[in-house]
Image (spheres, rainbow, N blue to C red):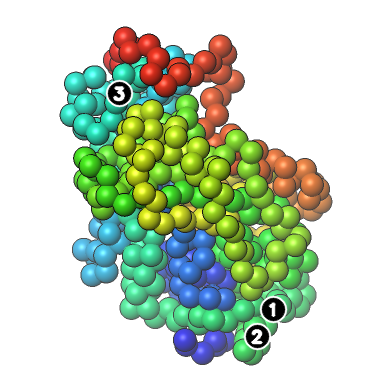
Amino acid sequence: MAEVRDAEVTIVGGGAIGCAVAYVLAGAGYRDIQVVEQGELAGATSGQAAGLVGQVRATRERSLLAMASVAVYARIEQETGYPADWRQTGSVRIAVTAQRAAEFRTLAAVARSAGLEVEFLTAARLAELCPMLDTSQVTAALWCPTDGYLQPHSLVTAYARAARDRGVTFATRTTVTGLSIIGGAVRGVRTDRRTIATDMVINAAGPWAAAVASLAGQPLPIVPVRHEYFVTRAVPGWHRDLPVLRIPDMRLYARAEGQGLLCGGWEPNGQSLDPRGVTIGQVLAVAPDWDVLSGFARDFGTFAPEVAEAEVREVFRGFPAFSPDGRFIVGPVPGVRGLVMAAACNAHGVSGSAGLAGHVLESLQPDPSPYVKSLSPGRYCPGTWDWESARSQAQRVYQNYYSLPPQHARDRELPRAGGDRRRSLSYS
């Protein structure tokens, strides 16, 4: 536990985003950076992440961000000597409806426009890649060979060690209690250990980011929404080199965890916290919701029946932060010089951390791209929203994570387990 100190740049939050920003800024020439974390590095939301890294997105900009992140994960150990436990296994998106298959064709076009390699799998190739699955329900399977997964704690540790090598210091078990704003500019940070001078505060506090922003008199709609998944003991046929799976029609994702299975999903009836009641330093504990988790297991069991009977080894859950419009909140806060946001990652805090850190760096430059400008917290300043609506909308962003866009949603009907086994895969 290093002593909190005066610094040119103080990053609040020692999760994936905070440590990635420290690593990227130090690499860009910032020489006086510290990270302040109320607990241990990766000890909260980041440590609960599933670690899936997918590059197929609904927009070209989001695909490019994910691709930039994958490029970092693929080389970080070679460049820094610190492993992120990155496994480039590829990923398969599985459709079980014609409407979802049509959406996949749109996603594939977006991916190709970004230069991302994707292809539709034949039935034989899907069976070869995923021999542990019953694929009789599948109507389309979209393959991205450069996707994969990593271990979140390993990634955060790699960022932090590499950042230390670049001169960044870390003060853990240190809680921010106030910000000193003089003449419309950040001048310092108060902590439970001492007050420090700083010219810039980068708010990467995850589900506590709204509370940190409020210390500067700048309320921002950053809403913690519950997310959870389970990991089983060994399941026959599963091993760590299998592709990551996404089954949007079932709201599910899965990957191997050793010889076991990691499986989670997006709840149709999400649970969120009122950001006004979340205080800095508060432990956001959540008990496992076994009704939800057993539903994930039951639904995934239609593709891998043995999973429904597998013994659960561990449950992970946390409160990733969402914004009402589903976009990141990144960049300087209008009206407070030196206050910069790196928040509302919408459950992409680990998977997109490298790309998001690059966007934070770009936001500090004189002429950021139109996309980075569009992520500015200025879209919520001043008072263009209310807390109740913002919380409801952010929760819907979570709930609709795998929802079909309107142009693909008509006449959607899910097949029943054990239904028509004559379905065949779509071909591109």
- Residue bearing mark 2: 192
- Residue bearing mark 1: 177
What's the distance in space between the residues labelled 3 and 2, CA to CA?
55 Å
Dot 1: element: strand
What's the distance in space between the residues labelled 2 and 1, CA to CA?
6 Å
Q: Residues within 10 Å of mark 1 (few under 14, many from 20)?
A: some
Q: Given contact means CB atoms under 8 Å apart, are the residues at marks 2 and 1 in contact?
A: yes
Identify which amino acid the numbered label 2 is placed on.
Asp
Image spot of residue 287 (x, y percent): 58, 57
The residue at 54%/86% (across/down) is: 4
Image spot of residue 353 (x, y percent): 44, 56
The residue at 39%/51% (across/down) is: 312
Dot 2: element: loop
Out of 279 and 217, give the one closest to the viewer: 279
Of badges 3 and 2, nearer the viewer stands 3
Q: Earlier in the sequence, mark 2 or mark 1?
A: 1
The quadrant holding residue 105 is top left
- Compared with residue 67, is residue 48 higher up or lower down, i.e. above or below? below
- Compared with residue 200, is residue 74 higher up or lower down, i.e. above or below? above
The quadrant holding residue 186 is bottom right
Quarter of the image with the C terminus is top left
- Compared with residue 59, is residue 140 higher up or lower down, i.e. above or below? above
Q: Earlier in the sequence, mark 3 or mark 2?
A: 3
Q: Using residue 323 as the reference point, say whether residue 59 is left or right of it.
A: left
Dot 3: element: loop
Q: Residues within 10 Å of mark 2 (few under 14, many from 20)?
A: few
- Residue bearing mark 3: 135
Q: Residue 155 — which label?
A: none
The residue at 38%/33% (across/down) is: 301
Out of 20 and 147, give the one closest to the viewer: 147
Q: Earlier in the sequence, mark 3 or mark 1?
A: 3
